[in-house]
Image (tube, rainbow, N blue to C red):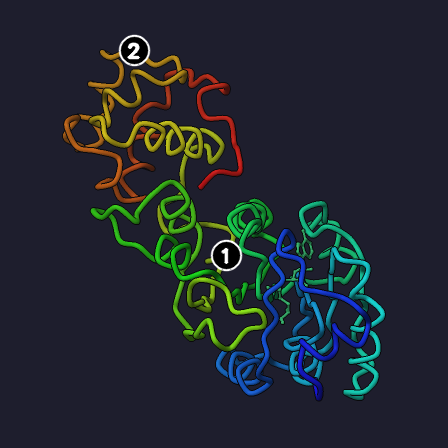
Amino acid sequence: MAASPRSLLAGHRLRPRRQLGQNFLAQPAVAELIVARAGVSADEIILEIGPGLGALTIPLARAARSVIAVERDPHLVPLLSAELAAGGVGNVRIIAMDALELDLAALARRVGGSLTVFGNLPYNISSQIVIRLMDARRHIRRAVLMFQRELAQRLTAAPGGRNYGRITALLTYCASVRRLAEVKASRFYPPPKVDAEVLEIVFSGVQPDFPAHDEARLARLITAAFGQRRKTLKNALAGSALGLSSAALQQALLQAGIDPSRRAETITPAEFVRLEISLRGCRIEERGGAEDSAP
Ligand code: SAM
């Protein structure tokens, strides 16, 4: 990206659209550093979410086999195409659509392998993207994503603190997460209110270390537990719409070796799995933990 995002947009009479989380990386060196730290290899097929003006797309295309770049803002597509041509990369396919509507499994099947997902994510859909990646994790090798610092802290939190929540427990169950870089707000145009962090999320393969008996039930249990996180785990679950009786919960918690008076934020993913397995004989109502986009 030779010209700055500000002058590129101004040249087309465009302004950054806040509702699409448009904070463009304004320093090519930062994008190159992220791609280098991620160690992108020549056999990887990259799905980039929100390529914008191509700050990450160009270094990714140079390092990887190919890039599928999914951009929701149709006004940016001609600028992106021109930037890619100027950068001399020919292995990028641009798809103008909402990334939340992508069928990740079908896309992975079409390209004949697993995907590496990249993105400087629009902040307003970041958690929804993480949830969708978890759901499709069998088709995803890894994800290297830039988040607002607050969400990055939630995704990497250990049990026991206020940052540890539903999305942390769900993600830790099926992936390992490491910090790759911090990026100051001043590196973007326009600068967001807070700094960003780049995380690498590696899905640990088909089987987690402690597999649940039924992952959908596990997700419902975790969602209900954090639905009332100030209550004890037993009261939070008994008061939820999971349809579990207090007596059944008491017995299952003790069988799983969990003190019923603990709160959800202290429960490790492995303990949630033990609880789900202890509840194997009990029906868990679906409406109690319906998946939503909230973290
Ligand atoms: N990757 C570019 C960069 O680093 O400079 C742009 C990052 S900007 C934070 C987010 C990008 O995601 C914008 O280009 C925005 O238009 C795009 N976007 C927003 N919502 C999207 C969605 N639902 N699906 C795909 N792209 C989206």
Q: Which residue is drawn at 74% across and 78% down?
A: 8
Quarter of the image containing the C terminus?
top left
Q: In this view, does 150 lie to the left or right of 114?
A: left
For the image shown, how many numbered marks are present on the structure? 2
Helix, strand or loop for disc 1:
loop
- In the image, 191 versus 293, the foreground residue is 191
Asked if the residue at tag 1 contacts the one at tag 2, i.e. Cβ–Cβ closer than 8 Å, the answer is no
Residue toward you, 37 or 273: 37
Residue 147 on image: x %, y %: 48, 61
Sort mark 2 into few (<14), some (14-19) or many (20+) by Cα contacts within 10 Å. few
Three-letter code, disc 1:
Gly
Q: In which quarter of the image is ligand 1?
A: bottom right
What separation in Å lies between label 2 and label 1 (alpha carbons)?
35 Å
For marks 2 and 1 on the same chain, the one whose residue lies earlier in the sequence: 1
Label 2 CB, ligand 1: below 8 Å? no
Secondary element at tag 2: loop
Q: Which mark is residue 235?
A: none
The tag on residue 205 is 1
Give the residue drawn at x 36%, y 29%: 227
Residue 185, image x, y percentages: 46, 71
Amino acid type, label 2? Ser
In the rendered view, tell whether residue 269 sits above or below residue 204: above
Task: Out of 38 and 163, give the one closest to the viewer.
Answer: 163
Residue 189 at what x, y percent from top left? 58, 72
In this rendering, position of residue 263 left or right of residue 29: left
Which marked residue is nearer to the observer: mark 2 or mark 1? 2
Name the disc covering residue 245, or none: 2
Query: In the rendered view of the protein, which quadrant contains the N terminus?
Result: bottom right
> Callout 1: few (<14), some (14-19), or many (20+) C-alpha neighbours within 10 Å?
some
Identify the residue at horizontal 57%, vertical 85% (top origin): 32
